[in-house]
Image: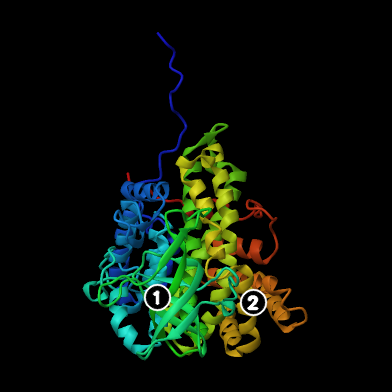
Amino acid sequence: MAATTHTVTNQPPPLVGYDVFTSDNALTEGVARYVADARLGEVRGELRTLGQAAGSAHAQQWGEQANSHPPVLRTHDRYGHRIDEVEFHPSWHRLLGHAVTTGLTAAWTRPDGHVRRTAGFLVWSQAEAGHGCPVSMTHAAVPALRTDPELAAEWEPRLTSRVYEQELRPPAEKTGALAGMAMTEKQGGSDVRANTTRAEPLAAAGEYALTGHKWFCSAPMSDIFLVLAQAPGGLTCFLLPRVLPDGTRNSFRIQRLKDKLGNRSNASAEIEFDGRSWARRVGEEGRGVATIIEMVAATRLDCVTGAAAVMRQAVAQAVHHTAHREAFGSPLIDKPLMRNVLADLALESEAATTLALRLAAAYDGDSEQDRNFLRLAVPAAKYWVTKRCAPLAAEALECLGGNGYVEESGMPRLLREAPLNSIWEGSGNVQALDALRALQREPAALNAFLTEIGTARGADHRLDRAIKGLLTELADLEGIEARARRVVERMATVLQGSLLVRFAPVEVADAFCASRLGGDAGAAFGTLPHTLDLAAIVERARPVVDG
């Protein structure tokens, strides 16, 4: 009889069949903090249902299938007609359809809409991140379109609809629609004022024909796109539909889909406008950046949220694995050094989630103070949270050892996704310089930011010292551009510390202030002071699996 050599032991069960929402203490507590009591039960119920779906076996399978079968460009149909369509795996449509039907594009139409949407986006993105691009673009297009009441009246009901319709059809025939964006060009990148795409006025008021090329077009299968082009009066924002009102296809040439590092289930394209591409002006000529900036700001919040989602899923996988994997006689999670690593990762994840929810609550507040706070807090958060995502994902992968380096674990997909949000909607330097402009030109923004962090003064001496140090940095304008990253990093960590001191358990706030603000940590994760209550931090981050 042959010897049995392949008995599987000491392997963790898959992290499946759990509620992604209720297993995340930082998220559930944040929702309770900001949602009005009268609606809290309703919102919790929605998010629990979404969390159970996100942690289910079928949603995880959808994510794997969508990434294993990337989108395919179909330039022509079988008869030779130009169609310029992108074909997706059915699982991608299931993910995107579920996001739309659960209200992840409907924040503008509901009370506490941004908090509940940010929480939902954080939960559902953990099933698969690539489909989040059209969700984000569709959501963010609304404030830009509101600069033109006529366009907003036509398109906002479709963009905020809970009906997912994937086919390209005449706008009048669609209840639900998706939006994309095409701003950057190969010669300019983030410098959109260098764009060369031309917009020639047509006979009808507000109508133009576009000619040019876009290096990155997000969500190219969408129904409409917000596009920047040079009109006679300067750089201007336009709405370009894929299907014209008479039912014919607009001229929208997809040249190729990008072969990306990660985010592979999502299509990003190079597109061409050939002089017959019909568009409607949004806002005034020459005010393109001012018109589209609200869309950019909203998508930057989604970058923070998307990074927080990757972080949370990476931490959940690492904690789950080490809780079930034994080495040298006991579970890995009980080893002092592994516990230090896990606690450090959990701190970073909780700080990211807490900050994302605070930004969402400011969007819901919509006061002058909230708007001024967001002007600085969004670029600072976008800079720092997205920067922390990749090293966290790499360290979490290492917690699984060789198992984490294998595709089947899901960790490589998280690691490839991790750099995306740092690049999307303006890379690190763009965010730092944007915050610097606000510091120099908008004193009300700085006042609002300082008021926010100042509410925690006196609660922790390390936070107090960090606030004092930040004020010293801000008072010195010499070489400020070269120091922009340093200043913005400090702004973000001080803001996170202020939020955690006010709202997180004492062990979390203590560890964050000691390591991130007090300097009592090394350069790598897992270098927290050993005297902290690390076991409580790790247990707080542990996902709970049913049964």
Relative to 419, does residue 151 appear above or below in the rendering?
below
Q: Residue furthest right?
A: 478
Q: Where on the picture, by quarter, is residue 153?
A: bottom left
User: x, y percentage for residue 9?
Assistant: 45, 29
Q: Where on the picture, by quarter, is residue 439?
A: bottom right
Is residue 26 visible from the viewing direction of this image?
yes
Label at residue 277: 1
C-alpha span from label 1 to label 2: 34 Å
The kind of secondary structure element at disc 1 is strand
Q: Where on the picture, by quarter, is residue 225?
A: bottom left
The amino acid at mark 2 is Leu
User: x, y percentage for residue 85?
Assistant: 35, 60
Relative to 128, does residue 362 appear above or below in the rendering?
below
Q: Indicate the quadrant containing the N terminus: top left, top right, bottom left or bottom right.
A: top left
Q: Indicate the quadrant containing the C terminus: top left, top right, bottom left or bottom right.
A: top left
Reading the image, the residue beneath label 2 is: 433
The residue shown at (44%, 72%) is 274
The residue shown at (54%, 50%) is 535
Is residue 28 visible from the viewing direction of this image?
no
The kind of secondary structure element at disc 2 is helix
User: x, y percentage for residue 513?
Assistant: 63, 65
Q: Residues within 10 Å of mark 2 (few under 14, many from 20)?
A: many
Q: Would you say 20 lies left or right of 519 here?
A: left
Given residues 224 and 107, the one toward you in this image is 224
Upstream in sequence: badge 1 or badge 2? 1
Q: Would you say 103 lies left or right of 180 here?
A: left
Q: Residue furthest front?
A: 80
The amino acid at mark 1 is Ser
